[in-house]
Amino acid sequence: MIRLAGLSKRFGTIGPLALDSVSLSVEQGEVFGIVGRSGAGKSTLIRCVNLLERPDEGHVEVLGQDLLALDEAGLRTARRSIGMVFQHFNLLSSRTVAGNIAFPLEVAGVPRAEREARISELLPLVGLETKREAYPAQLSGGQKQRVGIARALASSPRILLCDEATSALDPETTAEILTLIRNLRERLNLTVLLITHEMSVVKAICDRVAVMEAGRIIEQGQVFQVFTRPEAETTRRFVSGVIGHGVPSGTLARLPPPNPGEQQRLLQILFAGPGSTRSVISEATRRFDLDLNIISGRIDEIGGVPFGVMALAVYGESQRIDAAISWMRGLGLEVTEGIPEVRANPPAETA
Amino acid sequence: MGLLSPTMQDLLLEAAWQTLLMVGASAAIAVVLGLPLALLLLLTMPGGLAANALVHRPLGLVVNAVRSTPFIILMVAIVPFTRMVAGTSIGTNAAIVPLALAATAFIVRLFENALREVDRGVIEAARAMGATRLQIVTKVLVPEAMPGLVAAVTVTLVSLVGYSAMAGAIGGGGLGDLGIRFGYQRFMPEVMAIVVAILILFVQGLQSLGDRLVRRLSRR
């Protein structure tokens, strides 16, 4: 559906690349998330998909069309099949809800009667039947974003781009809007590309995710994969805010030292799918005569799959610890030695 | 009106009409010419929707030149142009020409500022929805800036009332001119007082009318 290849973009003649040969492809029906801190280049990237921003280099293919090869008129037509939702809603304050939703249709030359019919279809879809004649200033943030979504869907696009669509909303409203986007995706068979700085958004709605830093994609994959086995340090930090991956720095230094003749080893146990570590822990203690100190643990669900991470400090004889590890691995748990420490509170992001 | 002789009352009425005509006509011309010029300035500015320094710079320069010329000088300096347009260089109709010119230059900058206040995000959204530049102008820029544009017209009208007092220099007449000739030069303070009172009422009326309109248009 969306294929970006080798995109590079620099603002001005000097300075860092906003995009540094980024390649990405989003498949039909997928919700693809791009996550990164402000300035990572994600905004520029999503704007390249409908050419609000033109890349200096690279290839942009959307719905099988090479957008960079289109002339002005062709590009305008192509843009009508790509809906876009914005962080600050970007509604016309001089128009009512109905007027805002009608805008893309007016622009496309759809006759009035058809526009009205389409508005009547869209309003219940986003739950705003009663707000048809309200002005944006009279609506709450969540309602404004619903208008934004209805407007983006007015010309029946097959792709929806969400530019930090929930970043200006409170957590509760965010959840509502994400559920709405998810439902619409299914009902309308949409392909969604969203950018966000909140990993919780990715966790709630995305199938695949790419992590951006300094204009590059440093990691991408299935959301479950990236959340459970983050590779890059930045990814780990993003993920740790949402699920208990790693422990706050300084935690490990405060652990008690091992008894003489014993070892202290740090293990991270990852379990996915059905199964629990609870009996494993107590059984390992008995079976191998070890002391297991649980530093942290968390169970969560990502994309419908239950998932847990547990950080353990193990005290005991070296061989017995080794035996316990292979026993746990035999049970299908993923055991890694060493516990990543993460900065306790990554600085709050504003987009 | 026992204070004024019937002749004076006629003069006052005529002068009020002249002021109304000069202010109204030049403001109308300024709005009609000023809006396209302001849009042109905005669209052609660096980073604008139709960035073009070759249009933007000279246009900005001319607007600034007109704005920085004191009105009394401008009025005299463009007499040949006035004669070409109005067929004469004296009288109320002739005064409308320099007034309209000054008001246009004045309102262009005010319009430009009002248009610039339109949220860039909204323009971006319109582009993302496939709007043409003309559609962005007519469906986004102008409607969204409407309260600001109306406020600009109000400010221009009020300024024009002041400018029109100088129109007496080329025989334009009007209340200001009456005040100077009778109230000041003929030592008739009651004429001056009435003229000033009428002008104050006039400006007050314009301002509150403009404010009310802005409030009605503003949906923020």
Image (cartoon, helix red, strand yellow):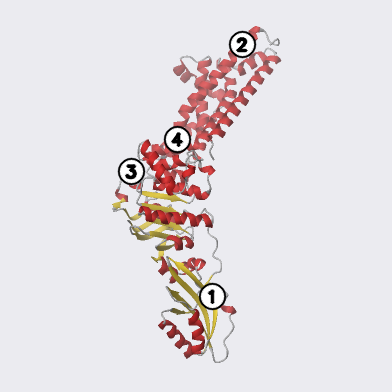
Q: Secondary structure at mark 3?
A: helix
Q: Are the numbered discs 1 and 2 placed on the same chain, yes or no? A: no
Check disc 2 and report the residue beneath it: B11
> Label 1: few (<14), some or many (≥20) within 10 Å?
some
Which mark, residue B39? 4
Q: Secondary structure at mark 1?
A: strand
Does residue B173 appear anywhere in the picture? no
Which mark, residue A72? 3
Q: Are the numbered discs 1 and 3 placed on the same chain, yes or no? A: yes
Residue type for callout 2: Leu
* Residue placed most toward the observer, A42 or B95: A42
Marks 4,3: beta carbons within 8 A = no
The image shows residue B50, relative to residue A47, as above or below, that is above
* Residue placed most toward the observer, B117 or B175: B117
Residue type for callout 4: Leu
Give the percent coordinates (x, y) of residue A43.
44, 54
Distance between the alpha carbons at the discs numbered 4 and 2:
42 Å
Q: Chain of mark 2?
A: B
Could you tell me which residue is drawn at 48 percent across and 87 percent down?
A321
> Label 4: few (<14), some or many (≥20) within 10 Å?
some
Residue type for callout 1: Ser
Give the percent coordinates (x, y) of residue B207.
60, 28
Q: Are the numbered discs 4 and 1 placed on the same chain, yes or no? A: no
Give the percent coordinates (x, y) of residue B93.
50, 16
- Mark in the foreground, 1 or 2: 1
